[in-house]
Amino acid sequence: MTGSTSGIGAAIARRLSNEGYAIVLHSRSSAKAGHALATQLGNAIYLQADLAEDTDRIRLVGEAVSRWGRLDVLVNNAGMSRVIPHTNLMAASPDLWRELYEVNVVAPFRLVAEAEGALRAAVGLGRAGCVVNISSHAGVRPRGASIPYAASKAALNHVTRLLALSLAPDIRVNAVAPGLVNTPLTADWTAAQQLWRERSPMRRPASPNDIAQIVMMLIASDYLTGEIVVSDGGLSLT
């Protein structure tokens, strides 16, 4: 579980733990929170890694497999966003594009590549290997914190489908594309909060547990692959 010390990632980690999975928690900087959550879950360890660095990606997968002896599920939740008005083209610099793509697209792909052998081996241990990427509804409609962010999530969605084709049938690859999710980060996003309350059919943003429930559905299925599950309370219908 990358990016799993708070918010959506922590909610998914708790659900996986409750289902009997041994967990590897990860973050780039919140080590204290990671160790605390690992202690709380019991069947978990915490590893710190900067997913912008390929050596850290390789190390993260290697240490996860070494600790538990197998890898059945990879959840790519860690991501990066930058808020830039879509009309301010000059603010979306090449360096920012590269930064977002490195974490939001290249890192998930590289983690899957490094984990492929262990995920295939899970088939012989009684489970099909499974990857779930956490994307964004900004990757399927022209919205989002910035154009580079939305484009990176659209790229992640396409990578999800390509990997589903390449790795089937041993490894299933799906994505969840949330809209607004209630976390401390989004608490003061007044306009977005109002938008979801007024225009989404469900009349509220998602909770982290809402997203965790969908992730668990994708993990539990032994048939779904290549799906991008938009979870925005129906806002994309309006």
Image: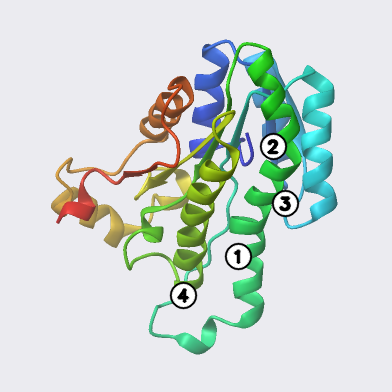
Q: Give the residue drawn at x 55%, y 35%.
A: 168
Say which amino acid is labelled 3: Leu
The relative height of residue 233 versus residue 129 in the rendered view (above or below) is: below
The relative height of residue 202 versus residue 108 in the rendered view (above or below) is: above
Residue at which label 3 appears: 51
Crowd class of label 1 (few under 14; some 14 to 19; many from 20; radius 10 Å): many
Where residue 54 sits: x, y (%)? 80, 54
SS at circle 3: loop
Kindly report which numbered mark, 3 or 4, lies closer to the viewer in this rendering.
3
- Mark 3 and mark 4: span between their CA atoms? 23 Å
Asked if labels 1 and 3 touch by Cβ distance under 8 angstroms, the answer is no
Kindly report which numbered mark, 4 or 1, lies closer to the viewer in this rendering.
1
Residue at which label 1 appears: 100
Q: Which mark is residue 26?
A: 2
Which of the two residues, 163 or 47, is positioned nearer the viewer here?
163
- Mark 1 and mark 2: span between their CA atoms? 19 Å
Q: Which mark is residue 125?
A: none
Q: Give the residue drawn at x 42%, y 26%.
A: 223
Which of the two residues, 119 or 98, is positioned nearer the viewer here?
119
> Residue 36: in sight, yes or no?
no
Q: Earlier in the sequence, mark 3 or mark 2?
A: 2
Q: Earlier in the sequence, mark 3 or mark 1?
A: 3
Residue at which label 4 appears: 84
Q: Quadrant of the C terminus?
A: bottom left
Q: Earlier in the sequence, mark 4 or mark 1?
A: 4
Q: Earlier in the sequence, mark 1 or mark 2?
A: 2
- Mark 3 and mark 1: span between their CA atoms? 11 Å
Q: Give the residue drawn at x 77%, y 40%.
A: 48
Say which amino acid is labelled 4: Ile
Quarter holding residue 203? top left
Crowd class of label 2 (few under 14; some 14 to 19; many from 20; radius 10 Å): many
